Amino acid sequence: MRTLKISLLVFILSITISAQNFWEPTNGPGGGYILSLTRNTNNCIFTGTTYDGIFCSTNNGENWIEKSDGLNTNQIYTLATNTNDNIFAGSYYGIFLSTNNGDTWVERNNGLNTLLIKAFVFTSTGKIFTGSFGSGIYLSTNNGDNWVRKSNGLTDNYIYALAINSSGHIFAIASGEVFRSTDDGENWIQVDNGINAAIFYCMAINSDGYIFVGTNNGVWRSLDNGTYFTHVDNGLPQSSNVQSIIIDSDDIIFAGIEGGVYKTTNDGNYWIEINNGLTSTDVNALVINSDQNIFAGTSEGGIFKSTNYGENWTESNSGLVSAYVYSLAFTSDDHIFAGTYNTIYYSENFGDNWIELNNSSINNFIRSLAINSNGDIFAGSGFGGISRSTDNGENWTLINSGLACTSVRTLVINPSDFVFAGTDSGIFRTTNNGDNWTALDIGIPTKDVRSLAINSNDNILAGIWNGGVIKSTDNGENWILINNGLTNSTVTSLSINYYNHIFVGTYFGGVFRSTDNGENWLQMNNGLTSTGITSLTTNSLGYIYAGSEFDGVYVSEDNGESWDQENSGLTTNYINSLVVNGSGYIFTGTSGRGVFRSAKSTTSLENDNNYTTTIFSLIQNFPNPFNPSTLISYRLPVIGFVTLKVYDILGREVATLVNEEKPAGEYEVEFDGAELTSGIYFYQLKAGEFTETKNMVLIK
């Protein structure tokens, strides 16, 4: 019998019937996309998010707790509180009411023809008006139990905001018009004479009855109950998108715009920028509590608080884990960096705590992160090119010299520390740590590059949106198209396992695999119920993890032959990024729920005393076919004597892999067939009365 090189890796994993969740949340990063804010009489602050429901703070924004029980949607456009502290939430799927401080919510849609709700206002007699996006205005006289349409006179039924003055006159902002009702909503007349703007967003009325309207062309004011409006934008940036207006008890007006927060103390005659400490300046919502603390809800940056009338702002996101994480990267000592829409976060303890890295050279929308052998960090932005840090993220420098396109989607670094950047307009390379970039476009059919990967032969693979996959064998100087069998060319992601098998994720084409360096591709979608793949990664055992746009994470333990969902513990199925650290823990960046990590290492060699499977099983080897080695796994429910042998097609034994007593557990053996000829082989597990045989193919 030939002498074979056999190495045995043994690990016992927990696969209990009542197994713990695969995923667990890290503690952040904090923040997220805030659409609405309100408060009750007890100074509890409530915030509505784009995709993550409602959060509440009972301690002035120091901490936030999710309050979404009973909601059938997490997309909350507006929140409002009446004098009884009943909270109304307007969402994509209608109206929800909480009468117990947000602990539970009940649907209140009876009578509504349109469920997308963006506004509420309450009269002194207890009537509630709501603005829908498509069928105008509705009235409820019984705390939302029933709604009656009140849209007579409206010429635009897409309602953005509602307000009421001290006389009980109700004002409604539609997409490009202002309406007024003086008879409890029975009739509406248009009252926006003088306003020169295409889109109206928000409205507020001060104690003198002056009406302020925020538009895509600054702020407009009426001194005569809406009869005529004048432009009051002195001090505001030109053509500002004013998305939120609030007025405090002293008639100081605050405006949230795409460029931060502005304040006026003279009825809008002059505005002052008050953005000190406001690191996210796309402000969607504002609220003031009874202590005159101001809260600003932003796009992606979460919530900021000011205790001095906006002079200074501090982030107020503890517990508000609603961030969109687009990219992740690990240093050699397992410190993790997370790229969000707003900035970069850093954790030294596996995500238990996150530190925001604020620097003017970090642009928004960090879609890619990469770290070279010296620990230098490169961050690719969707808007501003590439930033570099040489001191673990403390300081950043823009490095865009020669980078003709600053919309960067992907970064990869080869063993020589050459950095390659995939952009909306092709591929760029730097050989001097980012000081200069050179365009690489010979042979690239289309230039929207979404993913880059490098195999063990230093071949560079690039995935192109609507272009498939291209390969370079000369550091990017020349590229060739390698799409044979790739039936979907909208490539989103690439990953290469330690056998140099290439996996491609596509947009609604699922996953493709190549075992011959990209010469041929096979679609590998068995078990995938969602084929909108956003990200791919592989661990050191060859397990492949695929993140999807709607269905969470899938895993394949057999080289892509079959897939299973691995979503236990996830609170969202919108996956943006996946990465495995050196210890085999997988981290995923999500849309709106921050970062999750695997509760255990996916490659752990540690024993687990909780192993309680009730069945024997022999698992199909992977890869299969193989050359020259492959992995064989098996599971034992009880202690016993075990043999695992390999036979050729004539039934002759060619190797004994296991021949000893084993405790209950899951085991993996590496079988090396370097000295065997190509052909079909059989491997057989015997444990007590259990026997199972499978075949495998060696191809040289």
Image (spheres, rainbow, N blue to C red):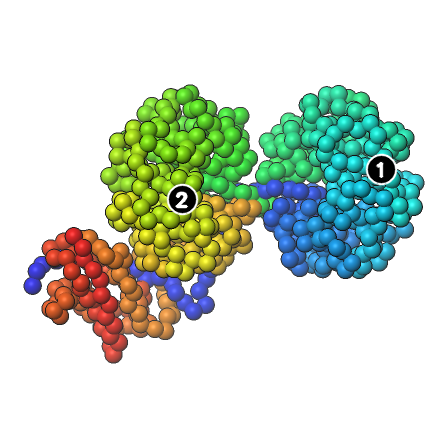
Question: In the rendered view, does 649 fall on the left or right side of 58?
Answer: left
Number of disc labels: 2
Q: Nearer the viewer, residue 526 or 248?
A: 526
Question: In the rendered view, does 397 fall on the left or right side of 652?
Answer: right
Q: Position of residue 642 (x, y in %)?
A: 22, 71
Identify the residue shown where x is 31% and y is 46%. Answer: 484
Q: Nearer the viewer, residue 688 or 124?
A: 124
Residue 56 seen in render: no
CA distance for labels 1 and 2 = 51 Å
Q: Give the quarter of the image for residue 616.
A: bottom left
| Mark 2 neighbour density, 10 Å: few (under 14) some (14–19) many (20 or more) | some
Q: Give the quarter of the image for residue 193.
A: top right
Q: Position of residue 643 (x, y in %)?
A: 20, 70
Name the residue carrying label 2.
489
Amino acid on which disc 1 is placed: Gln
The secondary structure type at the circle numbered 2 is loop
Q: Position of residue 617 (x, y in %)?
A: 31, 70
Amino acid on which disc 2 is placed: Ser
Q: Nearer the viewer, residue 665 or 377?
A: 377
Name the residue carrying label 1.
190
| Mark 1 neighbour density, 10 Å: few (under 14) some (14–19) many (20 or more) | some
Residue 299 seen in render: yes
The secondary structure type at the circle numbered 1 is strand
Identify the residue shown where x is 31% and y is 33%. Answer: 479
Instruction: Answer above or below: position of 350 versus 113.
Output: above
Question: In the rendered view, does 316 fall on the left or right side of 128?
Answer: left
